[in-house]
Amino acid sequence: MYTVLIADDEASIREGLKYIMDWASMGFSICGETANGEETLQAILQTEPNLVLLDIRMPKMYGTDIIRIARENGYRGKFIILSGYSDFAYAQTAIRYGASFYLTKPIEEAELQGAVEKVKEILIAEKNKSDNIALFKSKARESIIYEVITGMYDSEQPPGLSESELEELHLTLDIYQVVIYEKFSSDPSDPGYSFAELLKITNKGNHTFDYFKKDNNEIILLKGSFAINKFQDFLLHYEDSCPQSGSPLASLFLAYGRPVSSLEDIHLSYEEASALKNRRFFCIQGQHTLGFEELPDVQSLNHEINNGLLTEYSNRLTGYLLAFNRRMVAETLSALEDYLYEVKNDISSVKLFLTDLYLRIKEKINHTYGNPNVPFPNNAEVISHIEGCHHLYEIILYISEMTDMIMSATGNPSRDTVLDDIIYYIDHNFQKNIKLESIAPLFGYNSAYLGKIFNKHLGESFNSYVDHRRIDQSLGLLKEKNLKVYEISEQVGYKNVDYFHKKFKKYIGMSPAEYRKKLEDEGAL
């Protein structure tokens, strides 16, 4: 529905213009009426009607001046001039300023209807043209952003963008970062969240980020320090508290490349994020983010799985199972998981290797005990289950559950012994990104029950115990002058140095730098 403003100093004429024709059936609604020039100009600039029926001779301001000033202020609507025969010279001036039609009083219904229909045709044509231009710009923008992010854009090759065009796209900032996100689970009923909702930022005019979809993934280009700092705050919040069920992050997985300072390097951040997304299989349980700090150097992936490795691990695990040594079973599975993280074989080969590993252990146990009363799943079930796993940790936990089932069926060590093994495991592996949810199944517990055992027997939570071990280790490392604080952070298990600072201050009461300065003042360094 288009809008029309009626402007005439005579009330009877205004009333007549309102009822002389069926405005609604023609696609117009009357948005107001005015009786003098100043009111008319104010109404035009405030309401921006699509059409103004304007008397040429208005008190306080002539219609010609109204049109001129309105145009100077950016008004793009249409005017139909209403005037007497003696005002023809004014009407000519109004037409030069962009009035669409000139009608003489008294107004004939058919003449007015014809003029309004012509104006409507013009408005429809302009809208279609505007929509087409907007669509073209939108597609051109998406194409440019895609080329910039993926490294296809070359500023040296035509048609390179000018500085003003880059500014219009908000691509003249000093820092950029690429993030890829997708649903954490494969359940289509899981809710989706926009990236702006996640970071709690506005993105009017694509000032803070651009995005496009590729293979059901959202590719995000963060632009400027404000957006990137908000993203860092978001990651810190995640590090501090794992996402609860129903929270936005609980339904999403994020992979992000390093921040870069030039348009030409954006594709490097994208390539890292893309490589990390493809390595999601290697994430630990409950891990919703994977950053460039965790991307192994492709050249360093020199491990390879082979038949000799398969024999070695099946023999070791079978030996520990026969000795009921849960701690060494857990240590061996953890070491195997670390090894597989660095292999250059593809994911299907890793799954096949682990399937063979379990089936060999099953065969050795059956051979040793003479087909014991162990409720092994059949081979087809094992193959199907491992093939359906989306993560390495799921397969490791499955094998761990099977080993626990074997030990439970052939022996029953005490709970205290198991707890000692768990504490020993943590004390020797706190440098890794260990979580209660990933450790508990390795020792035959669910995470909620193991958490209760920790609180009851140690007087603190699992996370608190791990933090204490890490901070205690960092105190000794801070005496080493050649180690940077961020290096110490990584060595004790905190990949995010800001998070390390936060935890250190919580437990020690000062920052790592302040603690090192204190040691210097006391002559301990």
Image: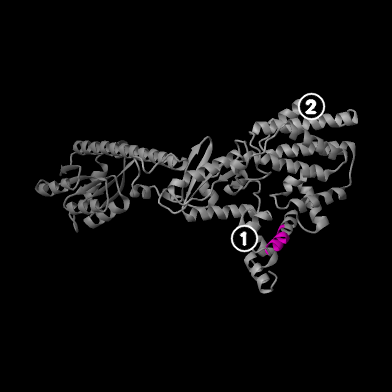
Tell me, what colour scheme is on the image? Answer: one colour
Badge 2: residue crowd in 10 Å (few <14, some 14–19, many ≥20): few
Q: Residue 452's x, y, as percent?
A: 79, 52
Q: Is residue 104 left or right of residue 273?
A: left
Q: Is residue 48 left or right of residue 414?
A: left
Q: Earlier in the sequence, mark 1 or mark 2?
A: 2
Q: Which residue is under mark 1?
A: 484
Q: Quadrant of the C terminus?
A: bottom right
Q: Measured along the vertical axis of the image, is residue 312 above or below residue 69?
A: above
Separation of disc 1 and disc 2 at Cα? 53 Å
Between 70 and 439, the one lying in front of the other is 439
At numbered mark 1, what does the secondary structure look like: helix, strand or loop?
Answer: loop
Q: Which residues are magenta?
A: 470-478
Q: Quadrant of the N terminus?
A: top left
Q: What's the residue at 78%, 36% (across, down)?
A: 312
Identify the main secondary structure in magenta.
Answer: helix
Q: Is residue 344 left or right of residue 167?
A: right
Q: Which residue is under mark 2?
A: 378
Between 368 and 167, the one lying in front of the other is 368
Q: Amino acid at mark 2?
A: Asn
Tell me if label 1 and label 2 are in contact, CB under 8 Å.
no
Quadrant of the image occupied by residue 307: top right
Q: Amino acid at mark 1?
A: Lys
Q: Residue 292's x, y, as percent?
A: 57, 47
Quadrant of the image occupied by residue 102: top left
Residue 132 visible (yes or no):
yes
Between 72 and 105, the one lying in front of the other is 72
